[in-house]
Image (cartoon, rainbow, N blue to C red):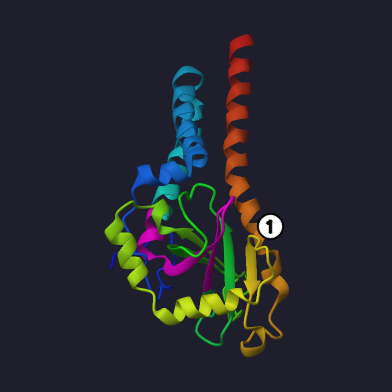
Amino acid sequence: MKDKRTLDNNAFASNSGNAKLNKWVWFRHQPIYVSLLTLFLIGSILSAIFINAWLLLVVGIAIFINIFYWTRTKERFLYGDSNGGVVVATHPTLIAVNTNLTKGYGDFLIVKIIQCKTLKKVEIGDRVPTVALYTASSEDDLSHWLDFNPIPLSFATNDPKVIESALQSYPNKQWTQLERQLSQLDQPYKAGLYRVDVENSDWSGASDELNVLSDLEENAGISLTTIILGVAIFIALLYVLERFT
């Protein structure tokens, strides 16, 4: 197996995604984010050519961000953990996925419900293969991951054979377990991360750090966009100074 460039080489999924990323399919589901990254790269190159050669530093940053983004997205679907999800709501589409956040000792069972606005033509009860990366804590001795971030496999590929192969890789007991765990959650379902089977697992006495993950995920997604917009504003100001001074 090739070394991972953006993921931990010491972490291995129990059921890898093994899916090749189709960039066009991904763009259809992430048009704003991909467009921002592309425009950032093109804009920085044009700025370095027509405004100031010092902006080649910005070009380097833009190239690094784009390479990292596409490499990580590619590695997510190749090496990430594949889990079965079920559509639990439409308008908007919500998908529930379960997993065990354990790092090898104990059971830390959770259900993650994600919103997928671009996932169309699905009905409640439909099964959806997903691929996830796990979020680690800053505390090395914590016995479980903090979160996992499933994304539908159909966001990376439109190959029906790949999607069907993923669905067949999930044992029946996983679907039964997910159905049972969903019965523990309040309805109507809402996007979020939920501990389940608390009494029969090792959640008792576990850190409450898990409860703030939704906010952390949203902020992490916003930060890169903020950086790009900040650099764009800087380039615009530099252009004004070059033009009128």
Q: Is residue 91 above or below residue 179?
A: above
Image spot of residue 214 (x, y percent): 66, 60
Quadrant where the C terminus lies? top right
Q: Nearer the viewer, residue 113 or 26?
A: 113
| Residue 95, magenta (yes or no) | yes
Image spot of residue 13 (x, y percent): 41, 73
Q: Nearer the viewer, residue 205 or 162?
A: 162
For mark 1, give the secondary structure: helix
Residue type, label 1 = Asp
Q: Residue at x 46, y 78 (%)?
A: 174
Image spot of residue 101 (x, y percent): 55, 76
Q: Is residue 219 above or below residue 39?
A: below
Which residue is tagged 1? Answer: 215
Q: Bin the neighbour count of mark 1 within 10 Å (Cα to Cα): few under 14, some 14-19, many 20 and up.
A: few
Q: Residue at x 44, y 67 (%)?
A: 8
Q: Nearer the viewer, residue 19 or 234?
A: 19
Q: Is residue 65 visible?
A: yes
Q: Is residue 67 visible?
A: no
Quadrant where the N terminus lies? bottom left
| Residue 76, magenta (yes or no) | yes
Magenta residues (range): 74-98
The answer to whether residue 210 is left or right of residue 61 is right
Q: Residue furthest bottom?
A: 200
The answer to whether residue 40 is left or right of residue 156 is right
